[in-house]
Image (tube, helix red, strand yellow):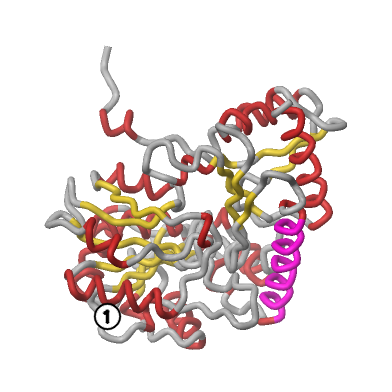
């Protein structure tokens, strides 16, 4: 009998999606499931993007340029410049989601068995992308006690070897919601410059920042690391267009971009209709973002406030994105999350959460933590935390 690859066996399950069969069972039993497990916004996609697809006059659905529509890249460059980012058309390659951009970044900067340092907890699929690329993740742990701030630079220095090729951050962070300060970004810039490393920044949540005095600092804004900096971006969260699967890889490093272009050519081109929608989405008025950010800020404040009312729960207040990590009074959040769906309901309702251990690559870390996405309306968040509170009481009885 033919066998699957070792690489395939090593590919990690998604901590976000692996509980879906249990959620399906819960629903078949007639229970309502509040989905706090996945970053799928309930915010409406901008009409201008949807209309562009509906009204597209296409006779032949042909390939686009491997780098994406030139018209889209031109408008995207203008958008970045309006945000204070010095990004030109030639600095952009459109990808099939931010996921492909990350795969291109790893493929272009690292060989098999090379190492990438990532502060954890981190977006779970970084483990998958690394495995697919034959790259070893070297984690540096941040903790809930200091809100998941950047670990000391000395901790990074200790981990750098001849195999280290890059440092990867998510800013603001998934799953923590942490927003790196200008000083922290500058510290990272200094270390990648010193050791000739790439600094890959996943900035797909750039607009989702909630406190008046906080500001996002992009790696594209740091002088002196133009050859080191790689930005990953996506329309998924910005415009609530997760299903479009359009992202981009951005860098001033010409050799890096020429290499990434070979990966882009090998997969031919990004999807046409999704590029049409994404290009049109750039015409979305600022009022859309103002309303969205205000809504998410209220949701964040509601969720954190309600979680803090539960005895034994510890939560780090996120500054951006739309996730938080909560520490629960349980030994194993995986077991608890499965029990919530398989064996528990409160008046016919339960909640689905993402166990946080899957957001670490260090074994046996984060076992009592969960990631909660505040992508539901405030009333549903309040009800979800009520269910969670009662469920913890029953589970621990």
Crowd rating for badge 1 (residues with CA inside 10 Å; few <14, some 14–19, many 20+): some
Residue drawn where x is 44% and y is 53% of the image: 122
Residue at mark 1: 226
Q: Position of residue 371 (x, y in %)?
A: 58, 48
175 relative to 102 in the view: left or right: right
171 relative to 388 in the view: left or right: left
Q: Position of residue 327 (x, y in %)?
A: 59, 46
Q: Position of residue 354 (x, y in %)?
A: 58, 42
Residue 99 or residue 213, whichever sits in front: 213
Task: Characterize the magenta stretch by its predominant secondary structure.
Answer: helix
114 relative to 199 in the view: left or right: left
Query: Is residue 59 visible in the rendered structure shown here?
Result: no
**Quadrant of residue 105 in the image?**
bottom left
**What is the residue that sits farthest to the top in this orientation?**
1
Residue drawn where x is 26% and y is 84% of the image: 224
Residue drawn where x is 48% and y is 40% of the image: 357
Q: Is residue 195 above or below residue 32?
A: below
- Number of numbered discs on residues: 1
**Quadrant of residue 86 in the image?**
bottom left
Q: Is residue 393 above or below residue 99?
A: above
Query: Is residue 299 visible in the rendered structure shown here?
Result: yes
Residue 248 is inside the magenta segment: no
Residue 288 is inside the magenta segment: yes
Q: Quadrant of the C terminus?
A: top right
Provide the residue span drawn in magenta.
287-305
- The secondary element bearing badge 1 is classed as loop
Q: Is residue 342 above or below residue 284?
A: above
Residue drawn where x is 63% and y is 49% of the image: 372
């Amino acid at each position: 009998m033919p066998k699957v690859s070792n690489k395939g066996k090593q590919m990690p399950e998604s901590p976000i999606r692996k509980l879906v069969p249990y959620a399906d069972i819960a629903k078949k039993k007639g229970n309502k499931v509040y989905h706090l497990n996945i970053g799928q916004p309930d915010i409406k996609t901008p009409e201008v993007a949807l209309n562009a697809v509906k009204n597209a006059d296409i006779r032949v659905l042909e390939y686009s340029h491997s780098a994406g529509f030139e018209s889209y890249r031109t408008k995207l460059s203008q958008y970045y410049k309006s945000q204070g980012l010095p990004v030109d058309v030639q600095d952009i390659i459109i990808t099939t989601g931010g996921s492909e951009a990350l795969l291109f970044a790893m493929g272009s900067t690292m060989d098999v068995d090379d190492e990438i340092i990532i502060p954890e907890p981190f977006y779970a699929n970084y483990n998958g992308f690394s495995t697919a690329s034959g790259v070893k993740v070297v984690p540096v742990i941040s903790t809930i006690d200091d809100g998941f701030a950047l670990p000391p630079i000395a901790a990074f220095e200790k981990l750098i070897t001849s195999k280290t090729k890059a440092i990867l951050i998510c800013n603001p962070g998934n799953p923590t919601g942490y927003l790196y300060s200008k000083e922290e970004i500058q510290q990272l810039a200094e270390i990648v410059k010193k050791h000739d490393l790439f600094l890959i920044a996943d900035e797909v949540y750039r607009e989702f920042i909630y406190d008046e005095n906080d500001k996002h600092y992009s790696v594209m804004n740091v002088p002196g690391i133009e050859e080191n900096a790689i930005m990953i971006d996506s329309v998924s969260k910005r415009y609530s267009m997760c299903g479009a699967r359009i992202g981009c890889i951005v860098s001033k490093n010409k050799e890096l971009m020429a290499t990434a272009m070979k990966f882009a050519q090998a997969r031919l081109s990004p999807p046409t209709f999704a590029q049409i929608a994404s290009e049109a989405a750039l015409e979305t008025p600022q009022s859309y973002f103002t309303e969205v950010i205000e809504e998410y800020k209220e949701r964040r404040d509601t969720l954190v406030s309600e979680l803090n009312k539960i005895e034994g729960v510890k939560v780090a207040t996120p500054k951006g994105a739309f996730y938080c990590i909560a520490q629960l009074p349980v030994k194993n959040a995986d077991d608890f999350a499965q029990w919530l769906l398989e064996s528990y309901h409160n008046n016919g309702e339960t909640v689905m959460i993402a166990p946080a251990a899957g957001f670490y690559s260090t074994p046996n870390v984060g076992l009592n933590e969960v990631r909660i996405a505040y992508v539901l309306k405030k009333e549903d968040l309040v009800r979800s935390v009520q269910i969670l509170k009662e469920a913890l009481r029953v589970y621990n009885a």
